[in-house]
Image (cartoon, helix red, strand yellow):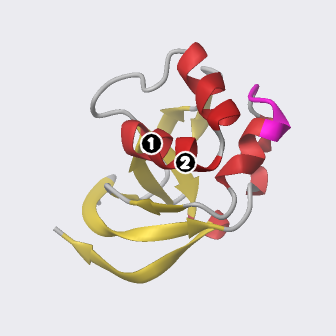
Amino acid sequence: MEMFIKCSGRIKVHSLGDQCNIDVPMSVRQEWVGLVLPIAGIASGGHTVTIIDGKKVKCEPSYAVLQSVALFELKKKSEKAFDWFREHGYPKSVEACFIFMLHTAAPVGEIKQI
């Protein structure tokens, strides 16, 4: 089974879910809620990923959003939250993604495999 499926489409973040165990201030994390973000793909889950604070966790099925794109959208909503990520070295690379668990975001329109 493929771990990452390239897709196009958008999601709207509606909650933080259990991603709140990371070392990002709550006031910064909450700024993701309500954002509409374009996805780069869907991760099937079951593999290990590194989350923002460097911890390794087993990944649940999730949406992947390029960090650079996500931060561009975040900056429109909150300069303060954007600044926190920039000060902590984000985006990590051109291809680095933030993950949003399926239960914390909903598709906006159609998601298509590419």
Q: Are marks 1 and 2 in contact (CB under 8 Å)?
A: yes
Determine the secondary structure under disc 2: helix
Question: Is 81 placed left or right of 56 in the picture?
Answer: right
Determine the secondary structure under disc 1: helix
**Snapshot quadrant of residue 29:** top right
Identify the amino acid type marked 1.
Phe
Q: Position of residue 106 (x, y in %)?
A: 56, 75
Q: Residue at x 65, y 24 (%)?
A: 84
Q: Which residues are magenta?
A: 23-27
> Which of the pair 108/99 is nearer the observer?
108
Depicted 44 relative to depicted 94: above or below: below
Q: Badge 2: few (under 14), some or many (20 or more) residues near its Cα, within 10 Å?
A: few
Depicted 19 relative to depicted 111: above or below: above
**Snapshot quadrant of residue 9:** bottom left
Give the labeled residue for mark 1: 72
Identify the amino acid type marked 2.
Lys
> Which of the pair 103/56 is nearer the observer?
103
Residue 47 visible in the snapshot: no
Depicted 11 relative to depicted 40: above or below: below
The Cα–Cα distance between marks 1 and 2, rounded to whole angstroms, is 7 Å
> Which of the pair 94/99 is nearer the observer?
94
Label ID, residue 80: none
Viewer-nearest of discs 1 and 2: 2
